[in-house]
Image: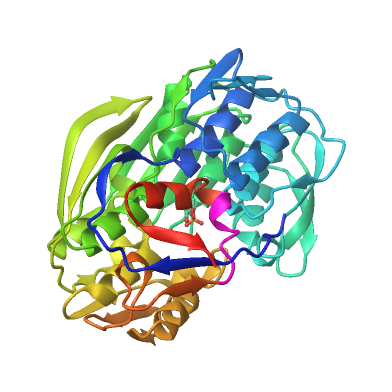
Amino acid sequence: MDAIARKLISRRATAPLAGSVTVPGDKSISHRALMFGALAVGETRIAGLLTGEDVLRTAAAMRALGAEVSRDADGTWRVAGRGIGGLVEPDDVLDMGNSGTAARLLCGILASHPIFAVMTGDGSLRRRPMRRVIDPLTACGARFGAREGGRLPLAMEGARDALPLEYRVPVPSAQVKSACLLCGLNAPGITRIKEPEATRDHSENMLRHFGATVRVTADGRARVIELSGQPELRAADVVVPGDPSSAAFLVAAALLVPGSRLTIAGVGLNETRCGFYATLAEMGADIVTTNQRVQGGEPVGDLVVTAGPLRGVEVPWERAPWMIDEYPILAVIAAHASGTTRMRGLKELRVKESDRVAATAALLAVNGARVEVDGDDLIVHGGGRLVLGVATAEPVTVDDAGFIDTSFPGFVALMNEVGAGLAPA
Ligand code: S3P
């Protein structure tokens, strides 16, 4: 579904931000919880599922493939699974909306199910590269037909007797890794995936949580993940942690509005998602983690954020997989910091929902920040007067805020609850 234009205006916050809030559930974990629930035997209950557009597309797809997916009045989701290999042919096109994660992971699941399916998405998703999953998945015996350049819509026929994959993922991508692992669930023997850099490991954690055997070995910066095929996945309850990528926006606001002190409770702290927080620590941010615990195989804690001065830093290219979705908001923070921030090696950001390097540079430039793109590096010169959001000197108007709902429903209300001044324009 393409977004409806909705104009929003953000003014400088007139008082410190304060309070204790929670953010919606982690998007990566939400997609996976629905998918694993559909592949398990029995009923999986999911608390804290993100109900943004992207995840609702996954819920609809799993329903179309024969799983029963419902939502209780208290917000708990229930998935009655079909067991590995038990999904049924969908009788219509699967529309994954704006979600690359949903599309790619689902390709992995379907590749080892002997059924025919057609998949599409919105204008942005139809432009994104799918070859990165089509190529490895073809090796299990699945057949794909796609538009030129491997773009959606695509038609696929999953393998009847899938072979286990042995694949070295050429780009650091949790989506590609996860697609290959999901395919391996319905293939006999060991599926062995090597990734050049460790990427988010929610699939590995959730596979274990549902009873699969997964072995991970480190080889320098690389990881080798081995999955034993055709396990009996048992339904398992999932409590979805708050999304650290969503929390990043509240953290940014709290750091930048003088005098603020904000607690964001129950945020996922998986280290493969914490590159943004490591960078902020290097910039001098005052963020304390309390109440650390493990929830459904994932570490969780509360973040206490106190505003203060920040300095520019160099963000090494190796960190990119661990903060891939947080560069745009880091760039905004960097525009308010003293000195220059150089973010290295952002090649993968160019194939997201938009070219995020170009989009971030344009966003900052139009709001008066000094920014440069040097190859795949983004350079932000801090200390400008007219920058963004709640710390802006002048009001900032957002032309189309409709896309916020795909990932962060309730964003505007939550920001205003802690003291930001966001209003319809
Ligand atoms: C995701 C992986 C990342 C990330 C995306 C979610 C996932 O994409 O940017 O928002 O849930 O596996 P890539 O794997 O394509 O880098």
Q: Nearer the viewer, residue 178 or 302?
A: 302
Q: Of 348 and 74, which appears nearest the observer?
A: 74
Along the line of sight, which residue is nearer the eye, 281 or 129?
281
Q: Which residues are magenta?
A: 399-406
Q: Quadrant of the C terminus?
A: bottom right
Image check: 64 left or right of 134?
A: right
Image position of 386 with respect to 208: above or below:
below
* Residue 400 covered by magenta stretch: yes
Up/down of 67 relative to 254, above or below? above
* Magenta stretch secondary structure, dominant: loop
Across and down, in percent, residue 312 comes to 18, 74
Q: Is 125 a magenta residue?
A: no
Q: Which quadrant: the N terminus?
A: bottom right
Residue placed most toward the observer, 181 or 123: 123
Q: Residue at x 57, y 44 (%)?
A: 52
Residue 257, quarter of the rendered image: bottom left
Judged left or right of residue 255, residue 286 is left
Residue at 56% across, 62% down: 401
Residue at (45% x, 48% y) in the render: 413
Q: Residue at x 66, y 34 (%)?
A: 59
**Outermost residue toward the top in this view:** 42
- Residue occupying the far right of the picture: 91
Residue 379 drawn at (x, y percent):
31, 81
